[in-house]
Amino acid sequence: MRRLVWTCAFLLGAFGSLSHGLAEYADVVLNNRAEQAGVRPVVFPHWFHRIRFRCMVCHVELGFEMRAGANDVTMNDMSAGKFCGRCHNGEIAWGTENCDLCHNGKPGLKTGIRGGHRTGGPGRW
Amino acid sequence: MSTHARIRRRGPVTLLLAAGLISAAVGCDIERLAGGPADGVPSAPAPTVAAADRVPPVRRSQRNTVEVPPDEALAKQPSAPWRSLADDGLHDPTAPALGILQQPEEALSVLPWDSAGNKVNWVRALEDGHINPRTRLYPETEVETLNITIYLNVGGRTNLVRFPHFHHTKWLGCENCHDRLFVDQAGANPISMFRILQGEDCGRCHGAVSFPLTECNRCHSVPQEQLETISRRPECVTRKRQKTAIVCEG
C-alpha cells in the first residue's frame, strides 16, 4: 500500500513537471460557445489587462466571477455594454466587430486557465 | 468492520496520500516550510548590483518590524522566459490578427522581475509606479485600501501566514473575498492547503493569476518563534477561533 502511495505521489509530481504551461501565466481560454458558433476560441491575457486595470474593475464592477469558465458571456451581452463590452466598445478598447483580435485561439482548446507555473493551480484539477 | 474502525485503519494511509499529493503538486520543500527562519535555506543567487538597481526594495510599513524572508525573486534570469504569442500553444499562428497584438515580452520585460508566474513582481510593479492600472470605471465605485495585517497560526512548526490586507486591497475590492470566499472574522475560515490546491480560498487567485503555490514562504513567512512577540505588540489583537489569528493595525 505504501508503495502505491509513493507511486501515486511520484506520478503526480512527474505529471506536474511535464505540464508546465507554455502559455503566459493566467491566460484564460474561453470556448464554452465560440467554436460552436464557428469562431476560434478566445484567449484572454490576464497579464495584458492587469497592467491597465486592477482586478476589481472586472471582478467587481463588471461582475466577472473569479473562476475561468464560470461566466456565461454572449456577444449580445457585449453589444449591450456588459462584461468585455464595457471597454471593448471602440472607445476604451477595440470594438466587438474586430472578431479576430479576441477570437484567436487554436481550435479545440478547452475552457480554463493556463500557463501554470509548476503548479497549474485550479487549472490542473 | 464498523465505519469508525475502517476510518481508523485507513486514516494514516489517507493522510500519507494527501501529504504526497500536496507535496508532489506543489513541489514544496516541507522542511523549508516548517524550518522557521529562511536564512538557512538555499535560495536563489544573490542579486547582482544591476538587478538591485533595477528593482528597488519594497517599502514596508515602519510599524511592521516582523522579519520576512529575503526576497528570492530579485535575481534576474539571463534569458527571456516569455513565449511569443504564435509559439505559446494557445494562439492559432494562422489567426489573421495575431500580429497586431502586443507580445508578452514587450510588456513584461520592463517590469520588476519575479521568479514565478508571469516573471513579474506585480505588487512591486504597482507600488513602485511602473504601472498605474485603473481602479474603477464608474465614478460611484468606492475604492479603499485596508491597512490591517493578519498573522494566521496554522499550527505545528509551520511558519505563520502573514496576510497583508494592504497589498491585496490595492488590487481587489473587499467584496471579491468577503464574504464570498472568507467570512470577515480572522481565524474563522476553514482554510487548508488541500482546499487551496483545489482552487478554493486563497487558491482562487494564487496558483491561477497571483503568485503560484510553489512559493510557500511568501505566505508562510513568519517563524513560530515570533508568535509571542507579535501578539504582545500594542497594535495587535489575538483572536482564537477555528485557528488562532493575530490581527494587527498597519
Image (cartoon, rainbow, N blue to C red):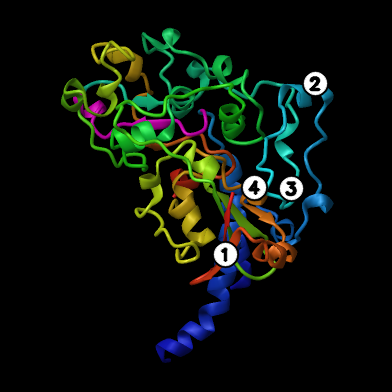
Tell me which amino acid carries mark 4: Arg
Tell me which amino acid carries mark 3: Pro
Q: Which residue is mark 2?
A: B50
Q: Residues within 10 Å of mark 3 (few under 14, many from 20)?
A: some
Q: CA distance from mark 4 to mark 1?
A: 23 Å
Tell me which amino acid carries mark 1: Val
Q: Is residue B75 left or right of residue B121?
A: right
Q: CA distance from mark 2 to mark 3?
A: 21 Å
Residue B58 in picture, x, y percent from top left: 68, 35
Q: CA distance from mark 4 to mark 3?
A: 8 Å
Write down the quadrant of residue B154 in the picture: bottom right
Q: Which residue is mark 4?
A: B218
Residue B69 in picture, x, y percent from top left: 74, 48
Q: CA distance from mark 4 to mark 2?
A: 24 Å
Q: Which residue is mark 1?
A: B237
Ranked by sequence position, the earlier of labels 2 and 3 is 2
Range covered by the magenta-colored residues? A24-37
Q: CA distance from mark 1 to mark 3?
A: 23 Å
Q: Do badges 2 and 1 share one subunit?
A: yes
- Residue closer to the observer: A14 or A112: A112
